[in-house]
Structure formats: structure tokens, C-alpha cells
Amino acid sequence: MITKTMNVYDSSLVRESVYEYDKKQLTIVFSSSMYHYHGVSLEDYNSFVEADSQGKALNSIIKPKYEFTKIETEDETN
């Protein structure tokens, strides 16, 4: 059973995303930070992935609807 999926983007803002189906958690990896978005529907995740611009989709589909947690990365702790 597939529990998560990862996508890499050719985007100046979003480097990659990971969606965990069981948790409905979307992780967005930027060049210098990472965020978990909680309770993201599969429909919204698919809209984000299929968008022409993940940055615009993040701002219009994901950010207005879902709470998030910023994840500390090694770059930020050193």
C-alpha cells in the first residue's frame, strides 16, 4: 500500500513536496525552509501538483485553507 508520494518541481520557490495519505499532511520543501501543512485534502494536493505554478497554487489553494508547522532544517540550526 502506498502511504506517501513525493514530487520534485522546476520552480524558483518550491523544490519538492511530500504528501502522506494517511495523515493528510503535505510537506513543502523550499530552498532554505520546510513546512508541514495539516489536513490537506487529496483533491487540493492534486490541484497543487498539477498547477502550472506551484508557488501560485501554494498561495491560492494551500495557505488560505490549512494550518502549518515550520520545520527546522540543518541550515537554520548551524
Image (spheres, rainbow, N blue to C red):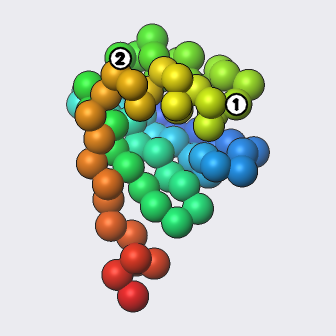
Indicate left or right for 61 with 11 as reference.
left
Residue 40 in sight = no
The disc placed on residue 53 is 1
Residue lying farthest to the bottom in this orientation: 78
Left or right of 78: which side holds 12?
right
Q: Quadrant of residue 22?
A: top left
Mark 2 or mark 1: which comes first in sequence? Answer: 2
Towards the viewer: 8 or 55: 55
Three-letter code for the amino acid on which mark 1 is drawn: Ser
Q: Is residue 22 left or right of residue 47?
A: left
Residue 70 lies, in percent from the top left, at: 32, 54
| Residue for point 58% across, 62% down | 31
Q: CA distance from mark 2 to mark 1?
A: 19 Å
* Residue drawn at x 27%, y 48% as measured from the top left: 69
Amino acid type at image mark 2: Ser
Among the 4 quarters of the image, the one containing residue 62:
top left
Pinpoint residue 49: horizontal percent, then vertical percent: 59, 26
Crowdedness near tag 1: few (<14), some (14–19) or many (≥20) residues, C-alpha within 10 Å:
some
| Residue 32 numbered tag | none
Considering the image in quadrants, where does the N terminus appear? top left
* Above-or-below relation of 74 to 23: below
SS for callout 2: loop
Label 1 secondary element: loop
Q: Quadrant of the C terminus?
A: bottom left
What is the x, y in percent for residue 28?
A: 47, 45
Q: Is label 2 or label 1 in front?
A: 1
Q: Which residue is mark 2?
A: 41
At a point 33% along the width and 67% down the height, the residue shown is 72
Category of crowding for the residue at label 2, using alpha-carbon neighbours closer than 10 angstroms: few (below 14), some (14–19), many (at least 20): some
Q: Are marks 2 and 1 in contact (CB under 8 Å)?
A: no
Instruction: Point out the residue furthest to the top here.
Output: 43
For the question of whether residue 51 can be seen, the reply is yes
